[in-house]
Image: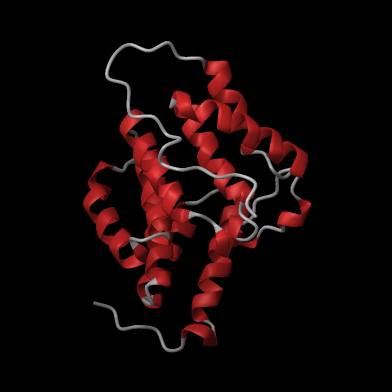
Amino acid sequence: MALFSISTTTIPPLATGPSTPNPRRDLDPYVAASSPNRPYRPTLLEDADRRRWDQARIQEGLDLAVVALPGGGRFALQAGIAGLHADARSWANTDWTMIGVLYDRLEALWPSPAVSLARIVARSYGLAGADRALEELTAFEPQLTGAVGRQAIAVRADLLRRSGRPAEARALYQRTLQLERYAPSRDFFGRRIAELDGPEFGEPDAQP
């Protein structure tokens, strides 16, 4: 049984008038719920060993998130997203539909390229799927610049990989590898390229 449950009734409608933000109330659950594993080591959430996560810290974040979410603040919504990730028993059991709902609300409350990109990723694992997420990313890409623009290249590469288009994905991973300076990220992109060159993906798809 899940420890943490969010329904659409938990999330208040967007405020239409002045409100009094409470940064401490909003930030505490976000920090707690998004810090399940210490010390931090770069890893895919999909591959993380959840048995090593600090369950007491997670529960603290979940309890605070339940209190903060009705306020609808930015950090409260981020806490809800982190809580759904942290409470999932496995990657396959992640409630992507509800995570997408929270990102919808976060994007409306605090619009930014980073939030929009994260929303597309979440939707790609939910009802939208990778192909639909590629269409959304294409429509949104003109707004992406700088660091978020570089992240969008990696996101597109992964969506292409998941959509069965390994040659296109490989080309973008190569481009991302050239742009990336952070050694752990470079190692990850290098592994992705090696995977795409392996037998699992068969012969590369034809370039358009």
Q: Position of residue 143 (x, y in %)?
A: 26, 42
Q: Position of residue 93 (x, y in %)?
A: 56, 61
* Vertical position of residue 200 compared to residue 63: above or below: below
Q: Position of residue 6 (x, y in %)?
A: 50, 42
In this rendering, position of residue 59 left or right of residue 82: right
- Name the residue located 25 percent from the left edge and 60 percent from the top edge: 135
Q: Is residue 172 visible?
A: no
Q: Relative to the observer, which residue lies in front, 170 or 75?
A: 75
- Name the residue located 53 percent from the left edge and 26 percent from the top edge: 68
Give the color scheme: rainbow, by chain, secondary structure or one colour: secondary structure
Q: Is residue 173 visible?
A: yes
Looking at the rendering, in which quadrant would you find the C terminus? bottom left
Q: Relative to the observer, which residue lies in front, 107 or 202?
A: 107
Q: Position of residue 65 (x, y in %)?
A: 57, 32
Residue 188 figure quarter: bottom right
Looking at the rendering, in which quadrant would you find the N terminus? bottom right
Residue 40 figure quarter: top right
- Name the residue located 27 percent from the left edge and 49 percent from the top edge: 141
- Name the residue located 50 percent from the left edge and 80 percent from the top edge: 197
* Vertical position of residue 64 compared to residue 145: above or below: above
